[in-house]
Image: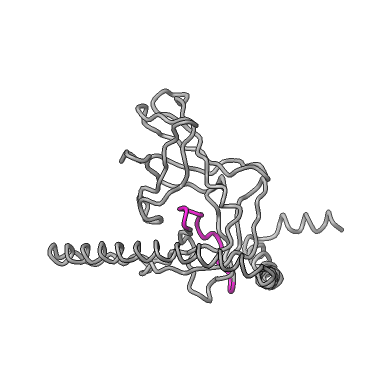
């Protein structure tokens, strides 16, 4: 019976396979989302068991962070006002490319086949296919699947994801791609077409950021740190290894950059 089922699946049309896969995902999504909500509730009650001294200390730390963030917000507002004045003087259109949609992580899937996570927002919040996903440390990945109430995020560590990037202090574009990662190892990626005059190693790493080419990711977002480069087989460029932020495997909340216009 198993052999017959496998043979029927192999000869089935692509439309039927896509329909069955989507239907199965939609049926199992409530289980994953419910488990995520239960985990959040468990953490909430666990935090209520902390002593008053611990809560007071945490409140002080939070007050310091709020003070620094308030200053950053004021500086950001001042920079935005300066940009708006310059746009008015130069008669340039406003650059409102994205709106921010924050989402909780419901499930993580790190295996030898793919690197991805499931978030608790989908087409019900207007999440589009291919939208960039970020967090405080930089790039998380992009939306690879959109369902009714959930979405699948393809992480930067996935070998199937490519990003046009630049090395810090250099404007020449390079190609970044996720690499084969160990299940319990730190995430990493590889870069290609690196200029020959770029050097980096583990003691003096170089920051790798998005270039803005391709129209998917805004420029300047951190991808990772280049820890090794060497000449490629043709000798025209270099290839290298990129260490990604280990927090990628521990994220509980991310932000989806939803394009302001469909174009």
Span highlighted in magenta in the image = 136-149
Quadrant for the N terminus, please: bottom right
Q: Residue furthest left?
A: 89
User: Of residues 9 and 194, which is closer to you in this image?
Assistant: 194
Report if residue 27 is visible in the image. no
- Report x, y in % for residue 8: 76, 58
Left or right of 145 in this view: 225: left
Q: Is 139 part of what is drawn in magenta?
A: yes
Residue 21 sits above or below residue 139 on the image = below
The location of residue 206, given as percent across then percent down, is: 42, 37
Number of residue marks = 0
Residue occupying image coordinates x 47% and y 24%: 233
Rendered-image quadrant of the C terminus:
bottom left
Observer able to see residue 54: yes
- Label the magenta part by its dominant secondary structure: strand
Q: Nearer the viewer, residue 8 or 170?
A: 170
Residue 51 screen position, x and y as percent: 66, 68
Seen at 51% across and 35% down, the residue is 241
Q: Residue furthest front?
A: 53
**Residue 12 located within the stretch drawn in magenta:** no
Tell me: residue 210, above or below residue 21.
above
Picture quadrant where residue 10 is located: bottom right
Q: Residue furthest bottom?
A: 124
Q: Residue 181 appears at what percent x and percent y?
A: 62, 42
User: In this view of the protein, which residue sits in the foreground, 176 or 25?
Assistant: 176
Query: Would you say 72 lies left or right of 62 here?
Result: left
Report the colour scheme.
one colour
Q: Within the image, what quadrant is residue 199 found in?
A: top left
């Amino acid at each position: 019976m198993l052999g017959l089922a496998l043979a029927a699946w192999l000869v089935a049309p692509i439309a039927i396979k896509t329909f069955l896969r989507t239907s199965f995902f939609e049926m199992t999504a409530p289980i994953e989302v419910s488990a995520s909500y239960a985990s959040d509730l468990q953490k909430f009650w666990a935090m209520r068991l902390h002593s008053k001294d611990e809560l007071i200390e945490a409140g002080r730390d939070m007050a310091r962070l709020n003070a620094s963030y308030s200053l950053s917000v004021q500086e950001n507002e001042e920079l935005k006002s300066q940009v708006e004045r310059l746009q008015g003087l130069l008669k340039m259109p406003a650059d409102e490319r994205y709106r921010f949609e924050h989402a909780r992580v419901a499930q993580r899937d790190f295996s030898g086949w793919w690197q991805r996570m499931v978030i608790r927002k989908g087409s019900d919040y207007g999440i589009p296919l291919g939208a960039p996903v970020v967090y405080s440390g930089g790039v998380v990945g992009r939306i690879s699947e959109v369902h009714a109430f959930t979405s699948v995020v393809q992480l930067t560590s996935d070998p199937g994801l490519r990003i046009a990037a630049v090395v810090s202090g250099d404007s020449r574009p390079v190609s970044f791609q996720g690499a084969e990662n160990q299940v319990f190892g730190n995430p990493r990626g590889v870069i290609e077409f690196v200029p020959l005059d770029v050097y980096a190693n583990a003691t003096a790493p170089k920051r790798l950021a998005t270039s803005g080419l391709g129209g998917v990711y805004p420029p300047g977002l951190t991808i990772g740190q280049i820890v090794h480069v060497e000449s490629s087989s043709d000798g025209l460029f270099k290839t290298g290894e990129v260490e990604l932020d280990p927090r990628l495997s521990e994220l509980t909340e991310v932000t989806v950059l939803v394009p302001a216009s469909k174009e």
